[in-house]
Amino acid sequence: FVAIACGNDHSVALRIDGTVVTWGGSSYEQRNDAPTCGGFVAIACGNDHSVALRIDGTVVTWVASSHGQRNDAPTCGGFVAIACGRHFSVGLRIDGTVVTWGRRTEGERNDAPTCGGFVAIACGMHCSVGLRIDGTVVTWGRRTEGERNDAPTCGGFVAIACGSYHSVALRNDGRHEGT
């Protein structure tokens, strides 16, 4: 295996040959609905859904679609990275723009940036963070737990990550900031 990801009660692994393996809960067909073909280079899991990125830049989403996690998935290519929140997903396109699909009731999609210049993405339970090429971070999604309110306004960041209700960014000098 070359990558693993976990959802609420299911897990996905990416094999070196580009196929995926799933295990765990299957209340939403997390295991039974997984793609059987290969050609995948990245995987991500939300609460009850999973996403895989193909080598050709297209995405495949399977399982739950109660919030559009599956039905709203983009059908175009050009993706270089994927991330999942609780009931939504984010894709980073080769041109540096982000595309979101799935739930939108807490701003998971509605507040997503429309500009480009992103080089990395990460998702928490109801929020997302993007790292821009200039080293600044942009957050979108829910605000009720402070997920967005305390985002740093300066630059110099080189990496990002999200927990359920918070985000962290690593500075180029090794220090970190969190929200």
Image (cartoon, grey):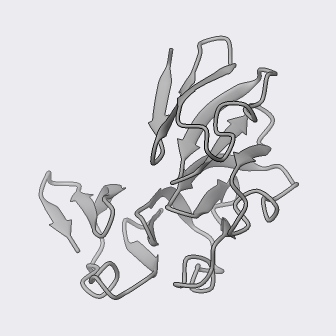
Of residues 166 and 78, the one drawn nearer to the viewer in this rendering: 166
Residue extending farthest left:
175
Q: Position of residue 131 (x, y in %)?
A: 43, 63
Nearer-the-camera pick, 48 or 53: 48
- Placement of 166 over or under 43, stated as above or below: below
Q: Residue furthest front?
A: 27
Tally the marks: 0
Q: Residue lying furthest top in this view?
A: 17
Residue 74 picture location, percent across and down: 81, 59
> Measuring 45% from the left and 72% from the top, which residue is drawn there?
126
Quadrant of the snapshot with the C terminus: bottom left
Q: In this image, 98 relative to 84: left or right?
A: right
Towards the viewer: 126 or 67: 67
Residue 175: x and y in percent read 12, 58
* Residue sitting at x 61%, y 38%: 26
Where is 76 relative to 45, above or below?
below
In this picture, residue 116 sits left or right of residue 57: left
Identify the image quadrant of residue 22. top right
Which quadrant of the figure has residue 118? bottom right
Pick the front one: 20 or 167: 20
For the point 45% across and 61% down, which residue is it?
A: 123
Image coordinates for residue 143, horizontal then vertical, percent: 37, 87
Residue at the spot 25% in from the left edge and 62% down from the top edge: 168
The image quarter in which residue 57 lies: top right
